[in-house]
Structures are given as structure tokens and as C-alpha cells.
Image (cartoon, rainbow, N blue to C red):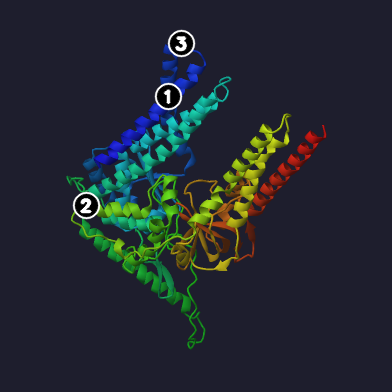
Amino acid sequence: MSKLLGASMLVIVAILGLVFAIGFLVLLKLNLPMGLTMALTGGFAVAIVLLQYCLGPMIIDYIVKVRWTSPDEMGYGSGQWLAGACGTFRIPMPRIGIIEEAAPNAFTYGHGAYDARVVVTRGLIDMLSPDELRAVVAHELGHIRNRDFIVMTMVQALVLALWTLYYTSRSSGRNNWYIVICAYLAYWASYYASLLLSRIREYMADYSSAQITGNPNHLSYALVKIAYGLAKTQTVGGATVPVSGGYRAPAPPPVSGQPASLYSYDQGAEAQLRAQIEAARYDDAHAIAARAVAPPPGAAAASPKKAPAKQAFSAAQLGAFGVMGVSSMRAAVAWSGADGLANPDTFTTAARWELFNPWGRIGEFFSTHPLTALRIKALQKLNRLFNQPDAFDFSKIRPATYKGFARDLALVSLPWVGLIVGGAVAGAAIAGSRSFDPSEIFMPLAGFSGGRLLVLLFSYMGDFKPTKVIRLLGEVEVSHVNPIPAALEGTFTGRISPGIAWASDYIVQDDSGFLACLFRRPLGLMKLWFGLTSADRYVGRRVRVYGWYRRFNAPYLEIHHFEVLDTGEIVTANYFPWAVAGNLLLTVLCVVAIVMFHGMAHSL
């Protein structure tokens, strides 16, 4: 814990130093007095931080559709448990909000511990057991205790300040190329440092959750369910009911004089109530099935046919999807066991890609959250402190080697190789020519666009073949540029970003699990318009989705098109053909310009 805290402080100090250094260089170039330069540099950094700090929570409140409610809506005894947890952490009770969407997610934000908000989605409540849900909420309380959502707001503001300094330095006068380069490099260094800090704070919040619950396995199971979408359904009497799911019951009347300690709620009463609810679910399933096969009044008694129960779509019954945190919500799923807990054997399948494909660690470098497998490893080390057995056996994970890594690296580097080669040819032509040739300007651009065109062609190859989510999740030989063409038939259970009106990416469920489906359009405005006007009407519909299964920091299916099964409507993303056409046109125009200007230069 002390190492994580020390690393956090080093990252923050480093970013502050970068802001001050670059700001000092930019202002110094303006030939201002030294005292004024120092004052303006410090004042600029402080102003950016304060602006981000003051406006950030207000912006989230405005954008995200949250219904503020009592903690007891998360389950029986949650209010008393939350009061005890906050007392242990010595923080005020946060506001509790619920987003009525199926994608499971939880996050916290605010100006400080005094007005912190903890938001969970309905999908998270319905999917997790009471212990797992409290472990997730305790994780968010850990963010509040550590004040790291405030720290991250400040760090992101400093990153924005460095971008502003870079932009300003480009117009600060001649002979300032070294300042522009330094500002640009500092911006990217600060950006990746902020991602590192975010991952460190997630580990610290995981530790806080283990402190509150006394059992790190609760969060481990929750992480596997959330990050891999573990939520199983089974057929009972002809009706589909959830095996693992939350439940909601009205809070009991407060008992006068009862202390709000961490474990002051009646665990025996809670277990009894849960058993009654599960029994009621089972009875309801049988009743639904009985109604489905019962003959109508007056019909002949001898009618042995059994019709399957036809139920309306229920996102809660289909499980849920996502990861903890607002900035990383793309993942796939595996099955849970009959007891509702994450299946350790299936987890070993899901974790193989993260542990043995090198793109997993590279993707983590670009992510706000650590890899789920690594978080669970860290939590299992904490089991020693709390005398708990390990939930998952990492020694059972079968080693693997990704054979396509060299090919992927070569493919990813093609545009940059083309840029360098084009620049080198242009440089050699300039050095060997006594007159200016405009064609040399287009050579690096032609090399880059040509390389990008090849990447697109190699990254969108193959025929779409029917498969299942669970099969895709177990694949190690896959990356973001080495996809698996796939056709999945299932239901759009919701959109990935809960509470966001313009979200256009989906969650699809088949009979083996869930998968994120990204709906890319040629232009960002086109995707935004689809999200605002059309995306919501496909939620809850049976679809057949065609696309490319990819994996980087999380698994996802990039949609080529999907077919709505009940209407036959086909919705096409159109990103791939337009991207190919655009790069092809740019490459051809560059080649034409090179030939034309080169011919003109030699004819003079």
C-alpha cells in the first residue's frame, strides 16, 4: 500500500513539474520579466485545475441520467451497512444514485468527500450477490477515502494545461521549434502518466474494498462477473430465470437505538429473505410454464402439446455487462456456476489472453484500469492478510504463445514506415536538386496513406462465420489488427455507456454470454446522430450481428452490419468501405500530384 501511495505522489509531482517547466519555456520565449513569467506559469496551472475541479461534477450531473435514491434500494440492510462502512473510513455518507440500465457499472465523483456521489446501474444490482455488490460499493468508497477522484480531476486538468501550452507554443514566434517539440512530448508523457496513476488508484481502491468486507474474494468474484460479464440464466419449468442476481426489498423500519456499525444488519434475516425471494422466483417460473401449456376453457382435455413460455424481454434476466469505472466498459463474458459464483474453470479460459498475449500488457498501458487477471492476482495476495482461501487457481491456466505478434507489429508500423520512407525519398530529392520541386511535399503523405490502406485491407479480411461468444473469449490468437470474422445471433441487451443519451455501441447476448459491439461510422457526427436518433429502438431486439472480433485492452466485436430478426431490417455501419475509399483516394491524389508537379518541374 505504501509503495502504491509513493508511486502516486511521484506521478503527480512529475506532471506538476512538466506543466511548470513547459509553461516557463513558453512564457520565457515571449521575453517577459522573470518574476511575471514565474507568476503567470503558476497561476495558469492553478486556474486550469480549479476550473476542472469546479465544473467536472456539474458536467457529469448534466450528462448522465441518474436517479438519486436511498441506499436501501440496493438491497436489504444496505443503508446500515453503508453507514458502518463510511464510519470505518471516517467519511460522510455519499449520495447514492441508480441508472436504470442493464449495463453493470459503478463510479464515484464529486468535489470532495463532503459531496461525493456513488452511482450504480440497475444491471449491477440485479447481477451481483449482496456480498459482491457491497464489495463493489466499498471499492467506490475507497476512491472517496483516498480522495483519488479529486486527484484524477486535478491530474487531467494538468494534462489539459500541457496541451494548451503546446498549442500556444506553436504560435509564439520563430525559432521556437524546440519548445513545440518539448511541449508536445510533455503532453503525451503526462497523459500516459495519468493513466498509470489511474491504474494505481484502482489497486488502492481494491485494497479498501478488502478492508471493509474482510474477504477479497467478494470483489474478485464481482470483477470476473463485471469485467467478463459473468451472468448465467437457466431454464426452470420452461421459463428463463437468473441463477445469480440481486434482489430488491423495502428496507425494514429503523430500530431505535440500534448502532449503524459495519455488520449491524441482521444477516440471518437477510439470508432468509433471499431464500424466500428465490423460492418465489422458482414458483413464478412454474406458474408461467403452467399458464403457457394450460388448455383454454372449453378445449379438449387431451392435448399433450407443450408450448414454450413466451416472456417479454427483461434485461435483468439476461444478466449485465461492463467494468468498474466510467472510462472502460468494453468486455466479453463466460458462464457462472450453478451456485451463481464465477466458474473458476471458465475464468482460466477467459484470463489466458490477458496473461499470454503481449497485446494485453500493451493495451493496459493505454487503459485507465489494470487487466482484470492482474487485479485478481493482487486481491488473492490480500487473502493472506484476511485468512481467506484463493477463489481462483492461476496454476491451472494453460500457457499459450501468440504467434502473430511479429506480423501485427509489422502491420501496425506500415503507415509510419511509409511516412519515413516517403520523407527520406523527398529529402534525398531535395538534397540532389538545385531547384524546388513541389512534388516532394506529397511523398511522406503518400507513404503514410498507402501504409494505412494496407493496414485496413489486412485488418478486415475473411468471411463471417457463425460462432458463440464463449468461443471467441477463449481465443488467444486474436488482436486489434488480427481479428476473427464472426456472426453472432442474440439480443441487444442495452448500450455500453449507461445514462448517455447519444451512446451508439451495444451489448449483445447469445446463449453463451455477452460481448461489446462497437458501431463505428465514417464520421463522428454520423455516429453521434445514430446514437441520438436510432440506437435506443434496437435495444431488446433479437439480432444477427456480423463483424470482426478484436481484442486489445478488452474484447469487442466491431460491427459491419446487423440484421433485426423480427423485421428483417439491416443496419450497416459503413466504416470499413468509407475508410478504404478515403485512404485510396488520398493515396491516388498524392501520387497524381507527385507525377504532375515532378513533370512540371523538369519541363521548366
Asked if the residue at tag 3 contacts the one at tag 2, i.e. Cβ–Cβ closer than 8 Å, the answer is no
- Determine which residue is flagged by label 2: 214
Residue 276, given in percent of the width and then of the height, sits at 29, 65
Residue 487, given in percent of the width and then of the height, sits at 56, 65
Q: Amino acid at mark 2?
A: Gly
Asked if residue 145 can be seen in this view, the reply is: no
Q: Amino acid at mark 1?
A: Ala
Tag 2: Cα neighbours inside 10 Å, few (<14), some, or many (≥20)? some
**Separation of disc 1 and disc 2 at Cα?**
45 Å
Closer to the chain start, of discs 1 and 2, is: 1
Residue situated furthest right in the rendering: 603
Tag 1: Cα neighbours inside 10 Å, few (<14), some, or many (≥20)? some
| Residue shown at the point (42%, 63%) measured from the top left | 317
Indicate which disc residue 33 carries.
Answer: 3
> Which image quadrant is residue 130 in?
bottom left
Kindly state the secondary structure of the residue where label 3 is placed: loop
**Separation of disc 1 and disc 3 at Cα?**
16 Å
Q: Nearer the viewer, residue 256 or 507?
A: 507
Residue 451, given in percent of the width and then of the height, sits at 62, 48
- Determine which residue is flagged by label 1: 21
Count of picture labels: 3
Marks 2 and 3: which is nearer the front? 3
Left/right placement of residue 398 relative to residue 402 reads left
Q: Amino acid at mark 3?
A: Pro
> Which image quadrant is residue 397 in?
bottom left
Closer to the chain start, of discs 1 and 3, is: 1
Asked if residue 582 can be seen in this view, the reply is: yes
Q: Quadrant where the N terminus lies?
A: top left
Kindly state the secondary structure of the residue where label 1 is placed: helix
- The vertical placement of 196 against 458, above or below, is above
Closer to the chain start, of discs 2 and 3, is: 3
